[in-house]
Image (tube, rainbow, N blue to C red):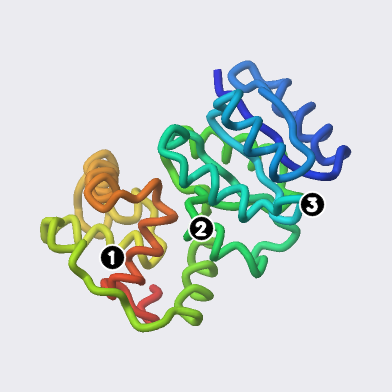
Amino acid sequence: MIRVLLADDQSLVRAGFRALLDAQPDIEVAGEAAEGEEAVRAVRELRPDVVLMDIRMPVLDGLAATRRITGDSALEDVKVVMLTTFELDEYVFEAIRSGASGFLVKDTEPDELLRAVRAVVDGDALLSPGVTRRLIAEFAARSKEPAAADALARLTEREREVMALVGIGLSNEEIARRLVVSPLTAKTHVSRTMVKLGARDRAQLVVLAYESGLVRPGWLG
């Protein structure tokens, strides 16, 4: 059973999400929070698998709440998905860097929301290929000089290659076709790369690909 915490200051939004999620045989809503401080307390108490976190909330905003959750080693298995009004919300990039596993727009289709909750529990970043490419393009436009690439030294040549392909927004299936390997092999390479670099998920791997200089602006395919 996938346990979800809903964190949003709009009661109607929470009620709509609860009705949809609780109707699924493999998902249950573990709790709700109307502001960031309450969300952090609820996560520590309830230990949900996924938090659907609104970015803009009173007392403590979703971004700060996400930092507290992802920065707590005791909560490393909790995945945070940001809820935004627009796909390229100004805070989305900082949210991903802070450890969020992805983001959803609030008016997303019900099937997409359910797919997303299940995807992050399976270890995938919650970013469709199209949205990933837009996210990367915006991140590239904002990026500064790349950080030292020391972390990449622990990767094999194939793992660097896979990380670069993740960095330009390719899915596991697309990486498999590019490298002429099976999707399972591609997924294994991605997983090993995340473990070696300490990335919580695919979204952070994209950011690390840019920050290390492995991928540079203009490389989008």
- Whether pointer 3 and pointer 1 mark residues with C-beta atoms closer than 8 Å, the reply is no
Quarter holding residue 117 = top right
Who's the residue at 46% across and 48% down the image?
125
Q: Is the residue marked by circle 3 packed among few (<14), some (14-19), or many (20+) residues within 10 Å?
A: few
The kind of residue tagged 2 is: Ile
- Name the residue tied to disc 1: 164
Label placed on residue 10: none
| Left or right: 47, with 125 as reference point | right
Q: CA distance from mark 3 to mark 2?
A: 21 Å
List x then y, in percent, for residue 182: 23, 43
Who's the residue at 34% across and 63% down the image?
208
Nearest to viewer (mark 2 / mark 1) = 2
Q: Nearer the viewer, residue 106 or 145?
A: 145
- State the SS at label 3: loop
List x then y, in percent, for residue 103: 60, 52
Q: Earlier in the sequence, mark 3 or mark 2?
A: 3
Q: Is the residue marked by circle 2 packed among few (<14), some (14-19), or many (20+) residues within 10 Å?
A: many
- Name the residue tied to disc 3: 58
Q: CA distance from mark 2 to mark 1?
A: 18 Å
- Name the residue tied to disc 2: 96
Q: From where the camera sits, is residue 42 visible?
A: yes
